[in-house]
Image: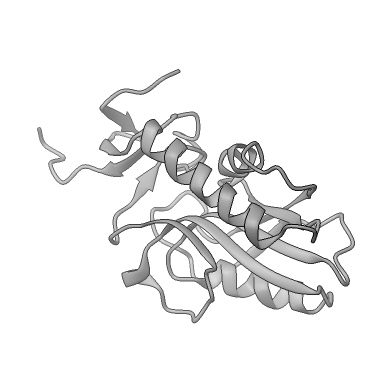
Amino acid sequence: MYKPDHVTCNNEKFDLYISKSQLDERIAELGEQLDRDYADKRPILIGILNGAYIFLADLMRHLTIPCEVDFIKLSSYGDEKVSSGKVTERKELDAQIENRHVVLVEDIVDTGLSMSYMINKMKDRNPKSISVVTLLHKKVATKYDVNLNYVGFEIPDRFVLGYGMDYAQEGRNLAQIYALSDNQNG
């Protein structure tokens, strides 16, 4: 498993920010919370591609309750480090969610634009309930009022990659989370 302390991605330096052991511990806790909150409810977890797939896979391995999974693909970043301010849907949801307990699984919520879009989209399909679990939340960057039911880590407004999150489609394979280095010349 590739776990360096520093990486270079697209000619920019990134430093270790959240270790694999910290991720494993917190995701196990989130799994326990979901098990308690969704006992006897059979939720459907909807991963938001591409970034959430690793988090969703690890989270599901901690669940003991019956559950289903589906994916939807959105884009609001393109190859940039900041949101474009526009959500583009790239893959539609396959599952029927009417009268179902929906758990949206996201890698990171920063402005809240994509999550606001997702919640509104899901509400149109009449689920029994909608909750959100995100691995990371940049609370200081949030501009859209979204209810995040489960948050792995609150982080400052820093650009991060690894553990499924990318920078221009690179860095998803990193087993840990890295933040853009404050020292780009060293």
Above or below, 144 against 86 in this view is below
Q: What is the residue that sits farthest to the left in this orientation?
A: 186
Above or below, 4 against 127 in this view is above
Above or below, 128 against 63 in this view is below
Decide if residue 5 is in sight here.
yes
Viewer-proximal residue, 43 or 75?
A: 43
| Residue 45 image point, x, y percent | 72, 54
Quadrant of residue 16 within the rendered picture: top left
Viewer-proximal residue, 89 or 31?
A: 31
Image color mode: one colour
Viewer-proximal residue, 74 or 59?
A: 59
| Residue 176 image point, x, y percent | 39, 33
- The answer to whether 90 appears left or right of 186 in the picture is right
Above or below, 129 against 152 in this view is below
- The N terminus is located in which quarter? top left
Name the residue rendered at 74%, 64% in the picture: 102
| Residue 55 image point, x, y percent | 56, 43
- The C terminus is located in which quarter? top left
Decide if residue 86 is in sight here.
no
Name the residue rendered at 77%, 66% in the picture: 101
Name the residue rendered at 52%, 42% in the picture: 28
Quadrant of residue 95 within the rendered picture: bottom right
Q: What is the residue that sits farthest to the top in this orientation?
A: 1
Viewer-proximal residue, 31 or 137?
A: 31
- Badge count: 0
Name the residue rendered at 29%, 61% in the picture: 157
| Residue 167 image point, x, y percent | 43, 43
